[in-house]
């Protein structure tokens, strides 16, 4: 119970002091060879670090579909470019893979690590364009390339 209260207090502190952004994205997975659609949020911890949970559903290709859950940490890189904000990505990945054909149906889950690079480009004071490239290290390795948008709450 103490851990639950502590977690709730921590979440309230982060949301009260963090710049929160939510948005959507489309992605392409190299191993599943399919496009996906997802939702993303970022919670700034300070001027350099942010936490970014994300879910992506990759559409069915050859009777295979994939659901991906990511919990990433972003580290903003210093730059002198106007507006363009590059960042490093590191985090955890959970994949649920479903195979459904006429003869049988199977499912597999894998945990892994995300490593990558992303960039955010503000379009206005509230909207930003994002692009990311991540490599998922697990038993189901794949390169994921994504673009999307974020809206500041």
Image: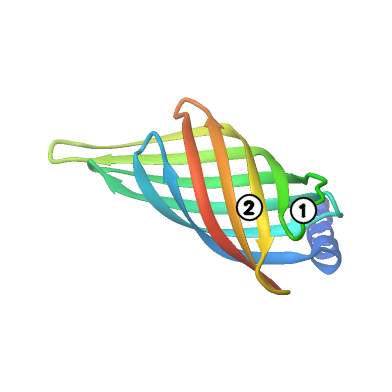
Which secondary structure lies at badge 1? loop
Q: Residue at x 73, y 65 (%)?
A: 20
**Residue 81 falls left or right of residue 128:** right
Q: Residue at x 36, y 38 (%)?
A: 32
Q: Position of residue 118 (x, y in %)?
A: 64, 46
Identify the colour scheme used: rainbow
Q: Residue at x 86, y 62 (%)?
A: 13
- Farthest residue, direction front: 81
Residue picked out by circle 1: 81
Residue picked out by circle 2: 53
**Residue 102 falls left or right of residue 40:** left
Which secondary structure lies at badge 2? strand
* Mark 1 closeness class: few <14, some 14–19, many ≥20 residues within 10 Å: few
Q: Is residue 27 above or below residue 136?
A: below
Q: Position of residue 142 (x, y in %)?
A: 46, 33
Q: Position of residue 55 (x, y in %)?
A: 52, 53
> Disc count in the image?
2
* Mark 2 closeness class: few <14, some 14–19, many ≥20 residues within 10 Å: some
Q: Place residue 140 in its image quadrant.
A: top left
- Farthest residue, direction left: 102
């Amino acid at each position: 119970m103490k851990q639950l209260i502590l977690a709730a207090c921590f979440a309230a502190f982060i949301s009260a002091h963090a710049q929160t952004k939510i948005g959507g994205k489309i992605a392409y997975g190299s191993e599943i060879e399919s496009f996906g659609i997802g939702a993303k949020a970022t919670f700034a911890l300070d001027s350099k670090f942010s936490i970014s949970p994300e879910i992506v559903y990759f559409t069915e290709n050859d009777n295979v579909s994939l659901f991906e859950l990511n919990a990433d940490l972003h580290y903003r890189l210093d730059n002198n470019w106007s507006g363009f904000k590059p960042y490093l990505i590191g985090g955890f990945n959970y994949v649920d893979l479903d195979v459904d054909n006429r003869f049988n149906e199977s499912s597999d889950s894998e945990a892994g690590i995300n490593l990558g690079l992303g960039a955010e480009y503000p379009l206005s004071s509230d909207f930003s364009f994002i692009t990311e490239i991540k490599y998922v290290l697990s038993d189901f390795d794949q390169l994921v390339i994504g673009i999307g948008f974020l809206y500041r709450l």
